[in-house]
Amino acid sequence: MSSATPTPTRVRRLPVVGALRLGRPSDVWFKPALSVVAAVAPPSLLLVALGRLDLAAYTMAGSLCALYAHHRPYAARAKVLAWVVLGMLGGLAVALVTASLTRNAVVLVTVGALLAAVQKAVCDATRVGPPAHVILTFVSSATLFVPQTLGQVPGHLALAAAAGAWAWLVGMAPAPLRPHGPERRATAQALHTAAAYAETARGGEESAGARSAAYAAVHAAWQTLLAARNRPSTTRRALERLVVRAEVALAAPADTDPARLRAWADAVRGSGRVPRTGDPRRDEGSLGERDELVGVAAEQAVAPRPLRSRLGPLAPLAVRTALGCALAGYVSLALGADRPYWALVAAASLYQANLTLTWSRAVQRVVGNLVGVLLFAAVTPVARLGPLALVLCILACNFGAEALIGRNYWLGSVCVTPLALLVTELPGYQPTGELVTDRVVDTLVGALVGFAAALAVTDRRAGRRVERALTAVDRARERAARLAAGPASTPAALEAARRGLAAAVVDLRATADAAAGEWWQRALPQERVVLAEQAAHRTLAATVRRQGLLPDPGTTSTQTHTEDTSP
């Protein structure tokens, strides 16, 4: 472990303009956008035909589950979508029963805040997202303020469950056409980012940010591939070998051909055969293609951490969410609002991994909602032409929100805001001026009160998590270095050590970045983090050379070796 002296963390200036900067859209932005339209349209149009559009809010609760799990392999997606539907129904059931038992607004806000905290913690612990807890909180909070009777609850839940089942089918529909689509996309992204990092490193302009992004992409690719751990296939094993090559490129960028990585990435994105990586062996003791996935097999055999242990570190975030949502709802009630759940949801949407990111989300939320109410005012005359026009406007807003939110949250909110306002008109039309005014006030209340709660509830354990991550990296590095230096080390041990060290480095960077965005905490050992990362990357390079996984420099990027990986 380095003995470098910890240096105080400089307080970051909270960004404003930077928070609104647009990024590149996701490669698959159209998938959630089209899926939510396909999931919402049939139930809503059926209710239009039956003259019961007032029930569309319940079917829409189930339909919105189609937004989830688009990055997961289909075997894992089936389970995740099922759990999302069950989670949506659970929150909806609590809200419906509570609404049928009391009309006390303070009680309703309190229940909504507690539900939001639970939904936030569980979604973060299980990494369900995007859109994570926000959709679940919106549905449960809005339903709390819809008058109910206990006799109506089973019917409303049945509508949501039927729409949820349809959303599950929509989410799984592409599986027969591209059974390995999510794994292919994740692998291609890992190869592209590794190629970009290798180019900068070979050009003498190595960037710590580019390196961290590349390691994160490779780690994400492994998580995607390992999510289908119980369904091995020739295609998946070929993709795993390509991710190994991306990982090797990060450890030894000077010995990497970026053009070859990009050629592999382009081939993987298509629907053809997966490129063959070639036999990386250079000497008799190195790790061959036949054995290079022993580390993957070992990781597949490891059981995931229990949910309880993953929820523990999220306690401060859950408290922030509960306190912020409750206070936002109470303030909205004190101001005479009819829909305090808007302020509650605005606060719930703010909370990110640290305070700096929470501030950025607050800025994005306010700007997006203010522009969104103007869009609502513009589309209202069209939406009020009839029930069919209202449903079509809702579908357009759903598509626009998912198509734009990947570029920046505020841009997606421009469509989310009129969507939320149009949903309130499903039972009947409301005065436009009143809706716009209430939405603006509740947005400002939710953002201000929610951020104030984030300031009040600090994460004091962030520094301790950095220390634990540093210890984990040091131990993983020592083990990998010992095995790389040992002449009798087995391929399985070397591969497992390298994979363990790479995962520890990714976790250290994520933990340090999250801690650096918190306020009111002890100084973080930033210098130790940098030195630990540098030492780990040197050890990774040494392990790669010991394994003999470096690509043959005589092999050009235009080779077309392929293997038949048809399902």
Image (spheres, rainbow, N blue to C red):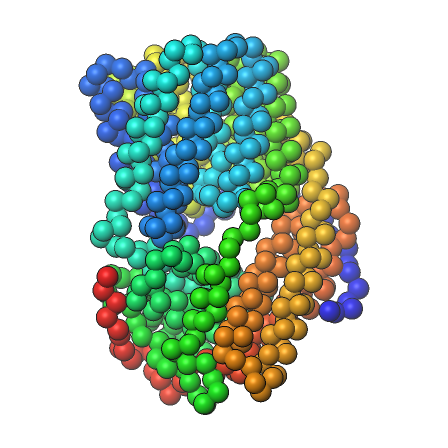
Q: Residue at x 59, y 64 (%)?
A: 505
Residue 34 in which image quadrant: top left
**Horizontal and vertical percent position of residue 492:** 50, 75
Residue 501 against residue 369 in the figure, above or below: below
The quarter holding residue 314 reads: top right
Which residue is found at the position 72% from the left and 52% from the top? 464
Residue 438 is situated, as x and y percent measured from the top left of the image, at: 50, 17
- Describe residue 199's horizontal placement relative to residue 473 as left or right: left
| Residue 124 pos. (x, y %) | 53, 43
- In the rendered view, tell whether residue 100 sits above or below residue 157: above
The quadrant the N terminus occupies is: bottom right
Say which residue appears at 26% left-offset and 36% top-offset.
38
Left or right? Give the position of 471 relative to 564: right
Of the 4 image quadrants, the one containing the C terminus is: bottom left
The residue shown at (56%, 38%) is 121
Which image quadrant is residue 466 in? Answer: bottom right
218 is higher (above) or lower (below) than 119: below
Q: Position of residue 346 (x, y in %)?
A: 53, 29
Residue 224 visible here: no
